[in-house]
Amino acid sequence: MLLRQIQFFVSIVDENSFTQAAEKNFVSQSAISQAMNALEADLGVKLIERKNRSFQVTNAGEYFYRKCRSLLTELETIKKETIRLGSDEEMTLHVGYINLYAGPELSDAIAEFSALYPEVGISVQSGTHEELYHGLVSGSLDLALNDQRRAFSDEYVNMELKNAECIIELSKRAELSEYDRLEVGDLAKMSCIIVSSKEQRDTEAEYYRNILGFANDFIYAETQEEARLMVIGNRGFLPVEAVGKLPEISGTIRRIPLFRRNRRVTRKYCLFWQEERTGYYIEEFAEMLRKRFS
């Protein structure tokens, strides 16, 4: 029994015609008939009862058709994944994460994924919300760990991870460091430190001002490490979010929960990727990361 014979048989049933099945497979009708005769001889049962110019599928043929249909679908999946494995372009998974995130979950997921799929490289980069968004749109990123600032789109898979609670980091020398909780308005006289590239500073400042409600002067840092040095120097406060497990900090910094009108300030974090780019590796990595956040 040959794969080609199975493909011919499925085509005959799908098209309900020997002639159209022959055209679909670019062979002659006699080749289709010979293949069917050989297949039935190999199985020792009739799959099709021929009646003049028409035919009827037997009970055995119906069962064989259903199983072969599933088999051909699975073979097509195997073919696509094999091509991916042999393609240099598909051998690297490009992952982006928002620069506010500093937990261990991402690195743990990368370690697990790399152990299971050593043939797949992982490229990782951080950025602002907008930089990650444009990376997904352009295709330079396969998936991104990002906060939600836009309505969910059907063009993307939006895997929700958690609602992260906003926390303020400030120097223990700051007057507000004695508080057990802070309202957004309490911070009005302090500078807000934003981690952002130079190109995205205006966009980030607009978001912090209009959406999160910080009516402050803004100062900027390129990295989380630089921002925390500013905090230690009592130059301002740094908003962070408990996306995952927060890293240890200097003993000169205090973390205080942030509230707005007596409600905890939170932001939703998700994994995003283009629906049309969905593939085995992306889904595997996303599930590994989701489990760590849950």
Image (cartoon, rainbow, N blue to C red):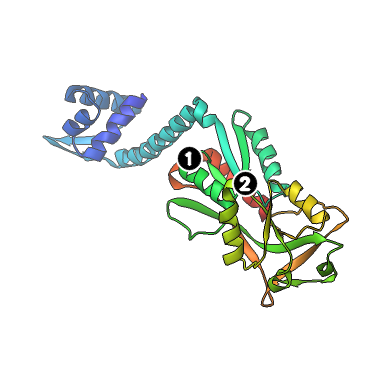
> On residue 127, which mark appears?
none
Residue at 52% of width from left, 39% of height from top?
280
Foreground of the two, 165 or 180: 180
Kindly identify which numbered label has been placed on residue 139: 1
Residue 272 position, x and y percent, is 53, 50
The foreground one among 146 and 280 is 146
Per the image, label 2 sits on a secondary structure element best described as loop
At mark 1, the secondary structure is: loop
The Cα atoms of the two marked residues, 1 and 2, are separated by 20 Å
Q: Quadrant of the C terminus?
A: bottom right
Image mark for residue 197: 2
At 62% from the left edge and 40% from the top edge, which residue is drawn? 125
Say few, some or many: other residues with alpha carbon within 10 Å of mark 1 (under 14 / 14 to 19 / 20 or more).
Answer: some
Residue ranking furthest to the left: 52
Q: Is residue 270 left or right of residue 240?
A: left
Horizontally, residue 232 falls left or right of residue 56, namely right
How many dots with numbers? 2
- Kindly identify the amino acid type of the residue bearing the numbered disc 1: Gly
